[in-house]
Amino acid sequence: MISDIRAQLVTITLFFIWVNFGISPSCASDILISSARVQEYQKRAETGDAQAQYDLGVCYYSGVGVQTNLPDAVKWFRKSAEHGNANAQHELGISLLYGKGSRKDVHEAFLWFRKAADQNIPLAQWNLGRCYFNGIGVDQNYADAVRWILEATEHGMCNDDAYMMLAECYASGLGVEANYDEAIKWFRKISHSGPLNAQYRDERDWHRKGSERGELTAQVSLSYYCYLGLGGAVDYAEAVKWSREAALRGDASAQYILGRCFYFGQGIATNQVEAARLFSEAAKKGNVLARRALDMCYSNRSSEAKSSLAGTAEVRPR
């Protein structure tokens, strides 16, 4: 009898919501269920249940089953985080990092990211890596940045910004030994349909226009975009064309990329001697990657290539 009365009340309530608010009975049912669930979370949260405290915080943060209330969300994230809930620790870190529902405190945000990262939360590991990379809430440390971003990717995080950051570190030797092949690996993980690649597509077009006007910086940038496949397909022939233009004008970065093309036969016939010459020219100007490439030529290639390097010992890595 009581269950029948409850069913009738629910039916009447759903019909009322439909008529007055234009919300379908199925959606209205979800709202009622969510509201009941929030009440359940509230009861359990007040007894110290860390998972319920986190779930309640999510409800307040997203406005599911309850009106959005960021300060209350942070309140419950903090209670849950203090009980060791890793997801709550990460969400509390985000709230503190951006000042959402709480004062902004990047130093405390960093500490919560670290706690969550130690519990293998991929997003926390990524955000911790970002903090180290940019010096947010902690002294800048590229080695720790690379370490934590790699941890995040190993735990399944897919993020174009993370791939780009790793690529930059390996290309420039920030926190790791410079390794252009490793940099290329991360560059090429960037989604061709994502917003970051759309940005690169626009930049590639812009660099092409600048290159055609004879702008050196644009020619160097376009050669890298074509070589790495940023903003479009990999195009070694175009990389050779524009890096050669810039290399003839003495740019060390262009000499390095053109040297790679000659060394690996990418977009042009393999020529170890020419590769060695280009690496040598770039290395003399302080290009670290060219120095390493020059050492590779000296160690692994033909006697002809070694002979061409006879006068370049002063620029080879020790």
Image (cartoon, helix red, strand yellow):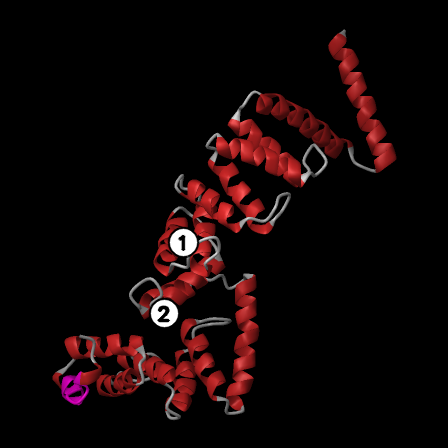
Of marks 1 and 2, which one's residue comes earlier in the chain?
Answer: 1
The magenta segment is 304-313
Q: Quadrant of the C terminus?
A: bottom left
Amino acid type indicated by mark 1: Ile
In the rendered view, does 220 fall on the left or right side of 60? left
Q: Secondary structure at mark 2?
A: helix
Residue type at tag 2:
Ala
Task: Give residue 167's quadrant in the image.
Answer: bottom left
Mark 1 Cα shell of 10 Å, populated few (<14), some (14-19), many (≥20) = many
Question: In the rendered view, would you say 181 is above or below 94?
Answer: below
Above or below: residue 271 compared with residue 318: below
Asked if residue 271 is among those painted magenta in the image, a careful observer would answer: no
Disc number at residue 300? none
Q: Which residue is mark 2?
A: 171
Q: Which residue is mark 1?
A: 149
Q: Position of residue 273 (x, y in %)?
A: 22, 87
Residue at x 25%, y 74% (from the top left corner) = 292
Q: Secondary structure at mark 1?
A: helix
